[in-house]
Image: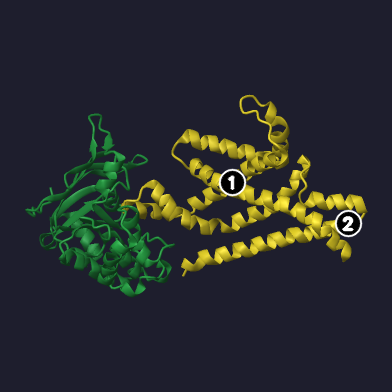
Chain colours: A green, B yellow
Amino acid sequence: MTGNDMGTPVMVQARDIRKAFNGNEVLKGVSLDIHKGEVMAVIGPSGSGKSTFLRCLNHLEVIDSGAVVVEGQTLVSTDAQGHAQYAPEAQMRAILRRMGMVFQGFNLFPHLSVIDNITEAPMVVKGLTREQIMPKAQELLRKVGLLEKADAYPARLSGGQKQRVAIARALAMEPDIMLFDEPTSALDPELTGEVLRTMRQLAEEHMTMLVVTHEMGFAREVANTVVFMDQGALIEAKPARAFFEDCSHPRIRSFLDNML
Amino acid sequence: MDYVISMLGPLSNGALVTLKLFFITLALSVPLGLALALARISRFKALARFVEAYIWLMRGTPLMLQLLFIYFALPFVPVIGVRLPDFPSAVVAFALNYAAYFAEIFRAGIQSVDRGQYEGAKVLGLSYSQTMRRIVLPQMVRTILPPVSNETITLVKDTSLIYVLALNDLLRAARGIVQRDFTTTPFVVAAAFYLLMTLVLTWGFNRLEKRYARYDA
């Protein structure tokens, strides 16, 4: 399915995902496998459905039909009548916890300090004490280069800093897969670099990543696989180098010409 | 001056009745209002509709009528018919009425929290109730402080309605002296009492607003 057989286990399996908003079909049957350690960049024009696809993988959007399997656990499948059937609540939340997510708009909790943003979910969801999670939280903050901002509130941070905190926050739940929904699109151009560097570092640690992005540089240099979507369909999924060297498909051609 | 001091005793007793009703009403109507707000936005449509109707009823009829109804008419209502003494009647009427107003304020506050906050909480694994308690409600507080402050100040003054149940609140105590001594001075002193109460409230809410503003840039 992906044109990139990594020879590693499949982490996320999406099959024939269909999704319509008010009769407008945004995803017309998208299938994709993400392998362990794979860094997959999803590119395509605005309105191609790439963000919606990402959001369908972790139940931020409810799909109409199709299947999502995460590490062998079925999040959603389709019954004989063609209706999507989600796993029961508790099971679903356990599956969703395997995936971390970084949003275009950060979605940090404004009433919590940076460090509390990171410790909140491990404490509330995993039941850890503050003392138990603190070393990990500080290590993550150091990793994204923001340890000195631990006690600041998000409103005090730049966009790039906010996004790095958001990445640290997601990592604190120790996900197996990280989903990024246009993580640099809301940033001033001079701030995208610091976020991309953090993501590159994560890729070097072999985190499995699915990144919806407009950053062709990131797709080319960091991703193993590039997926091109257009008008709700997956047009091509190829190893990154092959994708950029040989983009014979006319729609991809014209998209890349417009980007560069 | 001695005359003013002489009326402080009865007026203070009246003020105590006023304050007692005020605090009990607040303690009951704020949690009840929060529960109503959550029910009003719940996905159980029947529950949401029921609460909507309740709020309409409570906001759509005069508080004084509700007071009179609970004191005089409730005993004759089948099934729930119960005769309450005067002060508990007032407490029930005020709590039920103010809960409806608070519910609408809380609902607006909850709905002012960005959808991204729910999504951010969800992808971290928080349940709906955890998201509400830890993420949404703390952010709501900041938004609702000004309207809650308004409502609370209104409550201080609305307590004077309980004179219809012959309860000796601050205003009724003042009126008693006015009628006895043929002077309006007690009204002025009563006004000073009310102003003092609302001053303390205003000051308290200002402090709260400052505290909750700290996480803004």
The quadrant of the rendering that contains the C terminus of chain A is bottom left
Q: Which residue is mark 2?
A: B184
A115 with respect to B70 (left or right): left
Relative vertical location of residue A194 with respect to residue B35 in this rendering, above or below: below
Q: In the displayed image of the protein, which residue is found farthest to the top?
A: B78
Q: Residue B132: give x, y in percent of width and height.
A: 43, 50
The image quadrant that residue B10 belongs to is bottom right
- What amino acid is found at the position of numbered circle 2 in the picture? Thr
Q: Residue A201: give x, y in percent of width and height.
A: 20, 68
Q: Residue A233: give x, y in percent of width and height.
A: 22, 47
Q: Residue at x 47, y 57 (%)?
A: B139
**Helix, strand or loop under label 2:** loop
How many neighbours does mark 1 have within 10 angstroms: few (below 14), some (14-19), or many (20 or more)?
some
Q: Which residue is mark 1?
A: B28
Q: Residue at x 37, y 67 (%)?
A: A114
Relative vertical location of residue A222 with respect to residue B43 in this rendering, above or below: below
A92 with respect to B23 (left or right): left
Residue B181: image tag: none
Q: Residue at x 20, y 49 (%)?
A: A234
Along the polypeptide, which appears first: circle 2 or circle 1? Answer: 1
The image quadrant that residue A74 belongs to is top left
Is residue B59 visible from the viewing direction of this image? no
Q: Residue at x 39, y 70 (%)?
A: A151
- What amino acid is found at the position of numbered circle 1 in the picture? Leu
Numbered disc 1: what chain?
B
| Between A131 and B33, the one nearer to me in the picture | A131
Numbered disc 2: what chain?
B
The residues tagged by marks 2 and 1 sit, at their Cα atoms, a distance apart of 35 Å
Is residue B25 visible from the viewing direction of this image? yes
Q: Residue B18: give x, y in percent of width and height.
A: 72, 51
**Helix, strand or loop under label 1:** helix
How many neighbours does mark 2 have within 10 angstroms: few (below 14), some (14-19), or many (20 or more)?
few
